[in-house]
Image: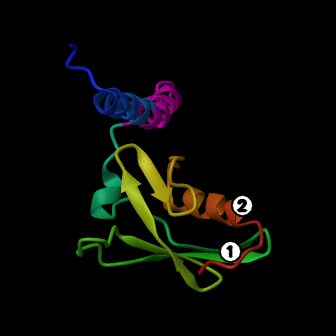
C-alpha cells in the first residue's frame, strides 16, 4: 500500500496553501519596489539621520513627529503622535511602516503618519 495517507496529504496541502498566502504580499511588495531607484540613503532611518520634526493638522487630526535620542532598541530617532496618542512606526529595509499600514511602505515617518490618519477614517487611535 502507498505511504501517502490522508493526514499527510492534508498536511502538505495546508503547507502549500500557507506558502502561497505568505508569498503573495511579498511578491506585491517586491513588484512595487522594483520601480523605485536607490538613493544611497536607504538606511538613514536606523541612525535617526534625516528626520524632520513636524506638527500639523491633517484631515482634522493633529499629527506630530518629535525627534528622540535614537539610542534604544525601539527608538528610531523619531516618535509620531496622532491627536497626542503615540503611533507605533517601524523602519523597514526600504522605508517605514506603521501598525495601521503594515503592508505598505512609505518613504518617511511624516508620510506613514499621514497614511495612518487616512486609514483611521476618523476613529481614535487606541
Q: Earlier in the sequence, mark 1 or mark 2?
A: 1
The location of residue 65, given as percent across then percent down, is: 52, 73
Q: Is residue 108 left or right of residue 7?
A: right
Question: Quarter of the image containing the N terminus?
Answer: top left
Residues packed near mark 1 inside 10 Å, few (<14), some (14 to 19) or many (20 plus): few
Image position of 33 with respect to 42: above or below:
above
Q: In the image as oriented, which residue stretches furthest toward the front? A: 1
Q: Which residue is mark 2?
A: 118
Q: Is residue 6 left or right of residue 1?
A: right
Q: Is residue 38 highlighted in magenta?
A: yes
Q: Is residue 63 highlighted in magenta?
A: no
Which marked residue is nearer to the observer: mark 1 or mark 2? 2
Q: CA distance from mark 1 to mark 2?
A: 15 Å
The location of residue 71, given as percent across then percent down, is: 23, 74
Callout 1: SS: strand
Q: Which residues are magenta?
A: 21-39
The location of residue 62, given as percent across then percent down, is: 69, 78
112 vs 15, nearest the viewer: 15
17 vs 58, nearest the viewer: 17
The location of residue 112, given as percent across then percent down, is: 56, 58
Image position of 99 with respect to 10: above or below:
below
Numbered circle sitting on residue 42: none
Q: Quadrant of residue 11?
A: top left
Q: In the image as oriented, which residue stretches furthest toward the bottom? A: 84
Q: Quadrant of residue 93?
A: top left
Q: Main secondary structure of the magenta part?
A: helix
Numbered circle sitting on residue 56: 1
Question: Quarter of the image containing the C terminus?
Answer: bottom right
Residues packed near mark 2 inside 10 Å, few (<14), some (14 to 19) or many (20 plus): some
66 vs 122, nearest the viewer: 122
Amino acid at each position: 500500500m502507498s505511504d501517502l495517507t490522508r493526514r499527510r496529504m492534508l498536511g502538505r496541502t495546508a503547507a502549500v496553501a500557507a506558502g502561497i498566502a505568505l508569498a503573495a504580499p511579498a511578491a506585491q511588495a517586491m513588484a512595487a519596489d522594483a520601480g523605485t531607484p536607490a538613493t544611497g540613503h536607504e538606511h538613514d532611518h536606523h541612525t535617526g539621520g534625516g528626520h524632520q520634526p513636524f506638527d500639523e493638522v491633517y484631515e482634522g487630526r493633529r499629527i506630530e513627529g518629535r525627534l528622540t535620542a535614537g539610542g534604544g532598541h525601539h527608538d528610531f530617532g523619531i516618535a509620531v503622535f496622532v491627536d497626542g496618542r503615540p503611533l507605533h512606526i517601524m523602519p523597514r529595509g526600504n522605508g517605514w511602516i506603521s501598525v495601521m499600514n503594515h503592508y505598505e511602505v512609505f518613504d518617511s515617518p511624516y508620510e506613514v503618519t499621514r497614511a495612518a490618519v487616512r486609514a483611521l477614517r476618523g476613529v481614535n487611535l487606541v
